[in-house]
Amino acid sequence: MKERVEELSNLIEGKTLEESLALVANAFPGKVRFSSAFGQEDQVITHAIFKHSIDIEVFTLDTGRLFPETYELIDRTRARYKRPIRVYYPKAEQVEELVTKKGMHSFYESVENRKECCYIRKVEPLKRALRDTAVWVTGLRADQSDNRQNFSLIEWDEPNQVIKFNPLLRWSYDEMLEYLKKHQVPYNPLHDKGYISIGCAPCTRAIEPGEHPRAGRWYWEASQKECGLHQVKQ
């Protein structure tokens, strides 16, 4: 699979979003999955997949701590495209043990506690979601954070043993907004209230003008602002 990375990179170079998604899906029939957190980037990709009937499964991770607006958007997206979206949940026994031992908000106490919560609610469910997957499609953009500047359109994801495809990596924020507007794609109304990057409700706040887009995530931390789903590359 690692050898296919360069081949796929050459294959999609210069192609549109829809063309590149279709090419990757055709290269690995039934083995391509897209993880959506229902952010604006994710809605762009979901629209491209569903509107053009591309053979890519769309799934999401429900941590149990999402905003009501996010849950509403999941249903609005289903209603718009009349297509299924698979939902993965954390293991109940792991959540029960964490909350019993450390309480409902242990993630505020330390980076280690926060990463433990992220692992239980997001990383472990993702690993289950990616079983028997050849290509994992994400909505990452390079200018979302410094950590993502070194990512590639197509790369090998060692922890999950899959090829990772980041089709919007080179898109600007304005390009993404223009796509949403042009195609009238439904998106989370929290984005219009200063919530640029939206995760779990207790861990996300709106950002102030001039703040970094990821400043609202784990806003009490001085960290790399990652949950563990994506490798931090030095």
Image (tube, helix red, strand yellow):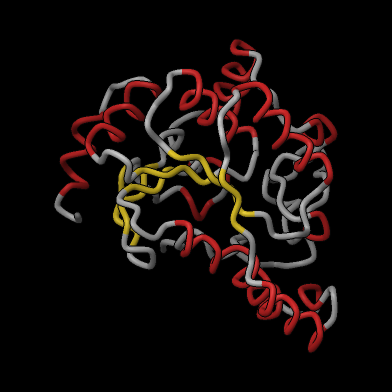
Residue 190, image x and y in percent?
81, 36
- The quarter holding residue 189 reads top right
Residue 3 located left or right of residue 19: left
The residue positioned farthest toward the top in the image shown: 182
The residue positioned farthest toward the bottom in the image shown: 101
- The quarter holding residue 160 reads bottom left
Quadrant of the image for the C terminus? bottom left
The residue shown at (48%, 29%) is 171
Is residue 198 or residue 213 the one in the foreground? Answer: 198
- Above or below — where is 133 with respect to 78? below
- Above or below — where is 141 with respect to 105? above
The residue shown at (69%, 73%) is 92
Residue 214, image x and y in percent?
67, 49
Residue 196, image x and y in percent?
72, 39
The residue shown at (36%, 20%) is 16
Quadrant of the image for the N terminus? bottom left
The residue shown at (54%, 69%) is 124
Is residue 211 or residue 57 the one in the foreground? Answer: 57
Tally the marks: 0
Residue 136, image x and y in percent?
39, 48
Is residue 174 or residue 159 the one in the foreground? Answer: 159
